[in-house]
Amino acid sequence: MNHTLLKIGQTVEVKIKKLGINGEGVAYLNRKVVFIPGTLPNETVLTKITKIEKNYTEGQLIHIKKASKHRIKPQCPVYEQCGGCTLQHMDYKEQLRGKYELVKEAIEKYARITDVDIRPTIGMKNPWGYRNKAQLPVHERKGQVVTGLYEMGTHQIVDISACPIQHPKVNEIIQAAKKVIKQLNIPIYDERKRQGIIKHLVARVGFETEESQLTIITARDELPYQKELILELRYKLPYLKSIIQNINPLKTSIVFGNKTKVLWGEEKINERLKEISFTLSPRAFFQLNPEQTVKLYTEVEKAAALTGKEVVVDAYCGVGTIGLWLAKKAKAVYGMDIIPEAIKDAKENAKAGGYDNVEYLVGKAEELLPKWVKEGFKLDVLIVDPPRTGLDQKLLDTIIKVKPKKFIYVSCNPSTLGKDLAVLVKGGYKVEYVQPVDMFPQTAHVETVVLIERKGI
């Protein structure tokens, strides 16, 4: 079939060739890629064309003519509407293999490396109930308070009150908060009218400590029935350690505002990863899957292979998780992050753990590193764990200029990882091996630990 003849609304039969980066099935019509959510590799399906662009086409699954042997019934009743998970219809063993393929393909496509050692994806024994945090918008629908995720391609909230990938207590906190807000008739924020108060609910639970925190994001300082709200929440959720209000008056997709108030209890909760303790403020980043985080950081530790003589730099350090994990075996650890609260937490975590060989600073790695090197600073191991956008071009240039002997890249996006590896390989580095880790079962996300070393050392 000639793709120029394709029309919106047309139904065609295709064979799914592979898994896409967002968990959709990928087919080809006359060498043009077609993305079809809800399909799996090796399936033959009927799809209705919903979008035609210059470089790709999108389709909607109409009927599966030949199903994959790896297709299973999703556990979640709103799986198809929600969009939070994209692979619940695929058996878990095959999810792990699919994530390996996504990493392999991205590295081959963008970095043009075909001889690299990519290891099988490290998975979970029980790939459910693993998330320690929910961050959900709040809407009012027919007089009811609804929290959840937006249905794919819409601004309609799908209620996910019993989400099977969240820790049960996270679901319980969100449900209780909704009931109390409804009971007290506290106005829900309306984006269109720019009226109301409650915008988001954020629940976080410590898996090891069982400490929990509820943050209520509001459009303004005033929170009606504050006293009653606190009393009801404490009655319904006796295990809560803190109730926080964060004020975000801006019309933005960013959830948190700059002002935070403790309504009741502690400002922070505690969590442990093995023997290392962390205090977490509401805005601080912390890995969402503690069980797999231990596996991820163990892989970073293996890759670093520290002897006690090395100076380690942890760029994008957050609350200091990776650096503190390595501190016992390092001569010194320096961490940096642009979020002041994260650095404050990192310093407190280092102090609480009795680490005197660790230093944390507010700032960007691409600005601090060249300055330090100019002052005679010698760096042995660099660790980066950047956001999905990958490494800043300035930081890539800095790494090539500063020339750390060993470089460990923790990535949450295979595409930007591949692109960054292409630059590093061109700059004199060699990829030793790649280890995918499944931090988010039932989704297409995959975390990767990559050991990179300078050529000729």
Image: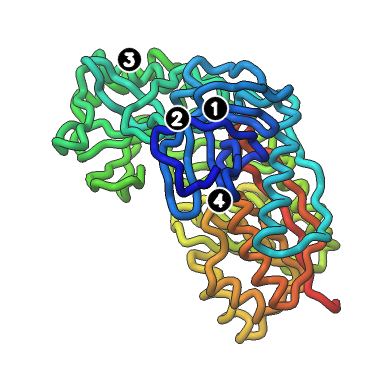
Q: Is residue 12 above or below residue 389?
A: above
**Residue 217 at x, y = what percent?**
31, 36
The quadrant holding residue 373 is bottom right
Disc 2 crowd rating (10 Å Cα; few below 14, some 14-19, many 20+) is many
Give the labeled residue for mark 1. Answer: 46
Q: How far is the residue under mark 2 from the one under mark 1?
A: 41 Å
Residue at disc 3, secondary structure:
helix
Give the labeled residue for mark 2. Answer: 203
**Residue 379 at x, y = what percent?**
71, 74
**Residue 182 at x, y = what percent?**
26, 16
Q: How far is the residue under mark 3 from the one under mark 2?
A: 15 Å
Give, as a three-letter code, the residue at label 2. Ala
Q: How far is the residue under mark 1 from the one under mark 4?
A: 48 Å
Instruction: Specify which label sits upstream in the sequence, 3 or 1.
Output: 1
Locate residue 448 relative to residue 171 in the image: left or right. Answer: right
Question: Which quarter of the rendering shows the N terminus?
Answer: top right
Give, as a three-letter code, the residue at label 3. Lys
Q: How far is the residue under mark 3 from the one under mark 4?
A: 33 Å
Q: How far is the residue under mark 4 from the one under mark 2?
A: 18 Å
Give the labeled residue for mark 4. Answer: 319
Give the labeled residue for mark 3. Answer: 179
The mark closer to the camera, 2 or 1, is 1
Instruction: Specify which label sits upstream in the sequence, 3 or 4.
Output: 3
Instruction: Specify which label sits upstream in the sequence, 4 or 2.
Output: 2
